[in-house]
Image (cartoon, helix red, strand yellow):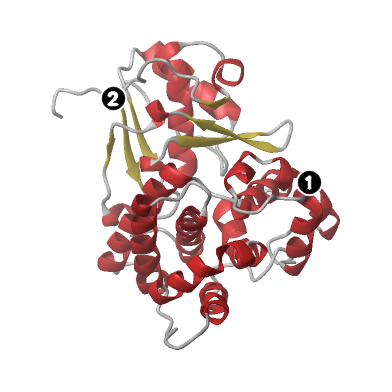
Amino acid sequence: QGGYTITGTYLDVPQDASIDAVKEISRLAVESGAEGLIAVGGGSVIDAAKAANFTFSHGGDLIEDYSGAGTLTAPLKPLVVIPTTAGTGSECTLVAVIYDVENKVKLAFSDGYLLPRLAVLDPVMTQSLPPKLTASTGMDALTHAVESYVGVDSSPHSEALAVAAIELIFNNLVKAIEDGDDLEARGAMLIASNLAGTSFSHSMVGCVHSMAHATGGIERVPHGVANGILLAHGMEYNFEECKEKYARLAYFMGQDVSGLSVDDAARKAIQAVRDLHKKMHALGAMPLNLREAGVKKESLEKIAQAAQEDGTTVYNVREVIAEDILVHLKNAY
């Protein structure tokens, strides 16, 4: 319809978009004579399409030519995105995260030209999302919003987007888990995910994502699950540097902070995150801790070291040191 022809499809993107999947998408697009890409799916599908667009548009080698940030000198071919989850915000971010299976590490690609040409947010596309995926992707969006709000590059613009996302998530995530057919809640979560994604495109994320990337790479814990378990612990890690901002966030999380000190109001925000996580666990939608998520205790030191080396650490308000992070990983276990 509309004069467009589908030249081919790729349906084998794994849980974490892999280098092999990205290369295959690019190869099929080139060989079919396609003029653009359409990604219908969750964050991994969208990230795979975004990364494939590097070599689909300009050739070369994905790792050697495009790893890191700001490698492009010309626009990519058109990419249209239709999210089927409400969490990653990948439809509006400048980042794609790809899993290196051989080295068990997640690689981040970042460039202004990675931004999709068009994003379609339709709550019907998320209506069949199971409770567990609704919960994990929703906690991913919440983590994006909280970390972008307190990050070293935060600004009034990114903060406004973040608080709007946080309020929407606290008012709608549990509703969407309990009733997947609640299109108002589904739509609100899609908007929240998009706002949070736009916010962290401005100010990036921090130590929670450092830990989640490492946990996902080493122990294959889904990204949203790792973020959901680790968000409150990452907030504790940054407490002294961020307590004034946490105190302000508590209000948007539905907490009554009138008359409270900054420290007490900030603690309310962290407790609100813990309570939301516990509510999803009670609904059977999310593991309570890293142990329930299948993480081996002997992997914690390796995860802490990988977190210290993750690219997101440069945006965290406190230096990410493996020994200090390990304390919080143990608390999350």
**Disc 1 crowd, CA 10 A, few/some/many (<14, 14-19, 20+):** some
Q: Residue at x 51, y 74 (%)?
A: 269
Q: Is residue 105 above or below residue 210?
A: above
Asked whether, in this view, residue 239 is left or right of residue 190, the answer is right
Look at mark 2 in the image and give the residue it sits on: 6
Task: Give the total of numbered labels.
Answer: 2
As rendered, which of 269 and 138 lies closer to the eye? 269
Determine whether the residue tagged by mark 2 lies in a helix, strand or loop.
Answer: loop
| Residue that extends furthest to the left in the rendered view of this protein | 2
Q: Is residue 150 above or below residue 167?
A: above
CA–CA distance in space, label 2 to label 1: 45 Å
Asked whether, in this view, residue 11 is left or right of residue 288, the answer is left
For badge 2, the amino acid type reads Ile
Look at mark 1 in the image and give the residue it sits on: 305
Q: The C terminus lies in which quarter of the figure?
A: bottom right
As rendered, which of 150 and 187 lies closer to the eye? 150
Q: Which mark is residue 272?
A: none
Determine whether the residue tagged by mark 1 lies in a helix, strand or loop.
Answer: helix
Mark 2 near mark 1, Cβ–Cβ under 8 Å?
no
Q: The N terminus lies in which quarter of the figure?
A: top left
For badge 1, the amino acid type reads Gln
For residue 234, what is the image quadrant? Answer: bottom right
Q: Residue at x 73, y 59 (%)?
A: 294
User: Picture coordinates of residue 186 (x, y %)?
Assistant: 32, 62
User: Picture coordinates of residue 55 (x, y %)?
Assistant: 47, 17
Q: Residue at x 37, y 15 (%)?
A: 74
Asked whether, in this view, residue 103 is left or right of residue 53, the answer is right
Looking at the image, tell me whether mark 2 or mark 1 is earlier in sequence order.
2
For residue 93, what is the image quadrant? Answer: top left
